[in-house]
Image (spheres, grey):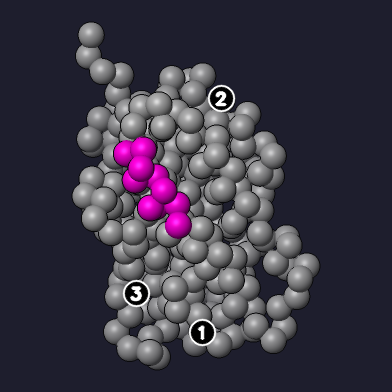
Amino acid sequence: MPDTPKVIAVFGAGTGLGASVARRFAREGFRVALVARRKDRLDALVEQLTAEGIDAAGFTADLSKPAEVPALIDAIRDRFGRIDVIEYGPISGEQSFSPAAKLDAATLQKDSPLLLLTPVEVVRAVLPEWAERGDGAFLMTTGHTAVAPRPYMSGVGPLMSAARNWLHSLNGELADIGAYAGTLSIAAFIARSEMGEIAAASLPEGVGPLVDPDDLAEHYWDLYTKRDRIEQVHPQPTSPGDKTSHFPTA
């Protein structure tokens, strides 16, 4: 019997990066699980991808609740039978930049589940399957402020930086079982993304061109297949004063 087609689960699926990642992996034969909080938008995306011939299903979940991750992973497995790749990149209008001098513990506590705690629980939930199979990949999206902090643009950055620290350690450990962890650090806002468009328009000083999510999805496919690096930055900032070091929206 032929092998069961692989499955990618896109956490924080939206019309920008999430949709592009789904299409890129589907071109290689992957089935697609889409996870998002807003059922109406999730259903619309599933309908669109299904019409394109992609085997896709949606799973409504609040990713700010890490305790619900095991049940979510079980639901995806019940539908598809397996999970081979996870792309984790949720963000919303509830997360925003803040001057470091004005950042408070309450903000960090509010945002840490989505940006730090839940991805840790996601990996914990899939790790036994990946260890048994000897393969798997966790792909995490962060903003460039996780890599290169900037004045007046704190807030999400410290939490994404902590998640990035964890992922770099995870990469070396997963190699022991044949699996992989990598991160795409996006130094711009993402086109075709609802939150990216809103965030870009809200900055009074303006931003550079929005990046094409199809290009980002291609980076993810390259990271997944080559596994020769932990991190990819896109686009590469042109100077220390580059205005496009922001955060991603799926």
Part of the protein shown in magenta: 169-179
Q: Residue furthest top?
A: 1
| Residue 208: percent from left, percent from top | 37, 79
Q: Secondary structure at mark 2?
A: helix
Res 195 seen here:
no
Q: Is residue 84 above or below residue 41?
A: above
Percent across and percent down for residue 115 are 58, 57
Q: Amino acid at mark 2?
A: Ala
Residue 150, disc: 1
Residue 82 in which image quadrant: top left
- Report which quarter residue 10 is drawn in: top left
In the image, which is nearer the foreground, mark 2 or mark 3? 2
Query: Which residue was labeled with disc 2?
Result: 75
Between residue 1 and residue 29, name the one nearer to us. 1
- Give the camera-side residue of 93 and 64: 64
On screen, residue 62 versus residue 16, left or right, reads right
For the view shown, which residue lies furthest in the right direction? 106
- Neighbour tally class for label 3: few under 14, some 14-19, many 20 plus, Cα within 10 Å: few
Between 63 and 211, the residue placed more toward the observer is 63
- Amino acid, disc 3: Pro
Vertical arrangement, residue 208 with respect to residue 162, above or below: below
Q: In the shown orientation, is residue 246 left or right of residue 50?
A: right
**Residue 209, disc:** 3
